[in-house]
Amino acid sequence: MLQVVIRTVNLSFYQYNSILKKASWLLLSGIIAGLNISPVSAQKNININQDSIDRPIVISGTSGGTIKVLNITQTENSPTGYCDGFVNPQPNHILTIDTFFDYLRLEVDSPADTTILVRGAGGVWCNDDAGSANPMIEGQWQPGMYQIWVGSYQPNSMDNYQIRITDY
């Protein structure tokens, strides 16, 4: 059980609020650990294999940039969809896959209309809308390193997103 003891009576509102936020985060972290749920990660580099993806992996970031996706892909279309949007020159994430996946899905969730670009072992894959305003890339994945960009439709439009990685 988490106990927070405040010994000073003369706390300002801001000091009290800061302590309360820290206590809330510690409590939430304990609940997440107790439930064996993966918290959202802002990781730049992700490594997976068949054994490490027993539950969804969720990573977060901010979409967008100043470079047209077309400048990176050098093509308007890929086997998984249209290559559109604006991204940063550097990828948002690097995904390293150690084993072959017969099926793997990367699905973006954002309140904004986003795009995705994946460049790696065997080619370039893009997607704009996969049944909703959010993009998704799914299918067989070879071992290797994959660069992942999440784009926005306007240059410098920065929108929060989460990518959910699953093998089902």
Image (spheres, grey):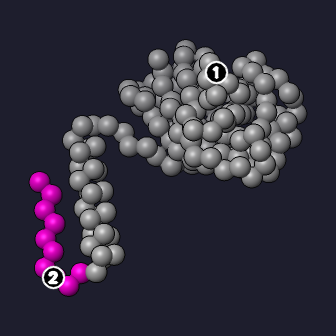
Q: Residue at x 51, y 30 (%)?
A: 165
Does the segment drawn in magenta span residue 129? no
The front one of 158 and 10 is 10
- Residue 91 is situated, as x and y percent measured from the top left of the image, at 69, 45
The magenta segment: 1-11
Q: Which residue is mark 1?
A: 130
Q: Which residue is mark 2?
A: 9
The front one of 71 and 27 is 27
- Identified by mark 1, the residue type is Ala
Q: Residue at x 47, y 17 (%)?
A: 168
Residue 70 visible in the snapshot: yes
Q: Nearer the viewer, mark 2 or mark 1?
A: 2
Q: Check the picture and name the quadrant holding the N terminus.
A: bottom left
Q: Quadrant of residue 129?
A: top right
- Residue 149 is situated, as x and y percent measured from the top left of the image, at 68, 40
Q: Magenta span: helix, strand or loop, mainly?
A: loop
